[in-house]
Image (spheres, grey):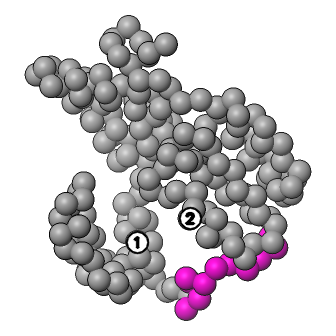
Amino acid sequence: MNSRRRSACWPSPLSISLIPLLVREAGEQRYQGLAAQYLMTTISLMDSLSLGMHNSVLCTEDAPFYGSEPVDADLLEASYMGPLQLQALEAICSVWPRGPMDERFKTPLATDIPVLLLSGTADPITPPAWAELAMAEMGNALHLIGERQGHGQINVGCVPEIVADFIDSADPASLDAQCLERSFVMPFFLDFSGPAQ
């Protein structure tokens, strides 16, 4: 396995903590740091994501519901990415093969199978409220929320140990998650000497 493959799929907390400094540097026409972070993140994503699987899942489970609710064109245009991503996904899914989808796909899963859900309060992609909705009918589930943490909690702090304990015990109620309180967010770098104190 090459070293890039072992890197996290998403930007690491250290990378994120550099962004204000790199943006300031770019504002002073020193673009090298920002360009390097962009390239490292792009390579990491290309190595970590299977676009074929991504497209197969998205085109089967998401695309059929596009247009089921009206989209405010002005709001979409004013959003960070504008209509580009939606238009690209619609184009991909117009030709990408779709798999089968259970007719109860959007029905909350009612189960007593042990389930562990992980969220971060600073996750704009899948916020904790979505996990709460997902576990509405689950009778044996535990939802752990990382304070001020983003997307991808599986590698944060002591979460790998909690997940290992969950796999060993298959008992959400037995998990000790107090260690999550010791997880921290890397402070922003104010200069190249290191993070703010």
Name the residue that disc number 1 marks: 58
Vertical placement of residue 175 versus 20, above or below = below
Q: Residue at x 24, y 75 (%)?
A: 72
Q: Is residue 66 visible?
A: yes
Q: Earlier in the sequence, mark 2 or mark 1?
A: 1
Residue 195 horizontal/vertical position (percent):
44, 16
- Which residue reaches farthest bottom? 103
Amino acid at pointer 1: Leu
Q: Nearer the viewer, residue 6 or 114?
A: 114
Q: Residues within 10 Å of mark 2 (few under 14, many from 20)?
A: few
Q: Nearer the viewer, residue 5 or 80?
A: 80
Q: Is residue 162 left or right of residue 193?
A: right
Q: Is residue 39 magenta?
A: no
Vertical placement of residue 144 versus 178, above or below = below
Which image quadrant for residue 98? bottom left
Q: Is residue 112 magenta?
A: yes
Q: Residues within 10 Å of mark 1 (few under 14, many from 20)?
A: some
Q: Secondary structure at mark 2?
A: helix
Residue 112 horizontal/vertical position (percent):
82, 73
Q: Is residue 176 left or right of residue 5?
A: right
Q: Residue at x 57, y 47 (%)?
A: 120
Q: Is residue 170 left or right of residue 89?
A: right
Q: Nearer the viewer, residue 86 or 1?
A: 86
Q: Main secondary structure of the magenta part?
A: loop
Are the two marked residues, 2 and 1, in contact with CB atoms closer than 8 angstroms?
no
Q: Is residue 146 left or right of residue 39?
A: right
Q: Which mark is residue 130?
A: 2
Q: Is residue 97 visible?
A: no
Amino acid at pointer 2: Trp
Vertical placement of residue 180 versus 77, above or below = above
Residue 82 horizontal/vertical position (percent):
20, 61
**Chain part drawn in magenta:** 103-113
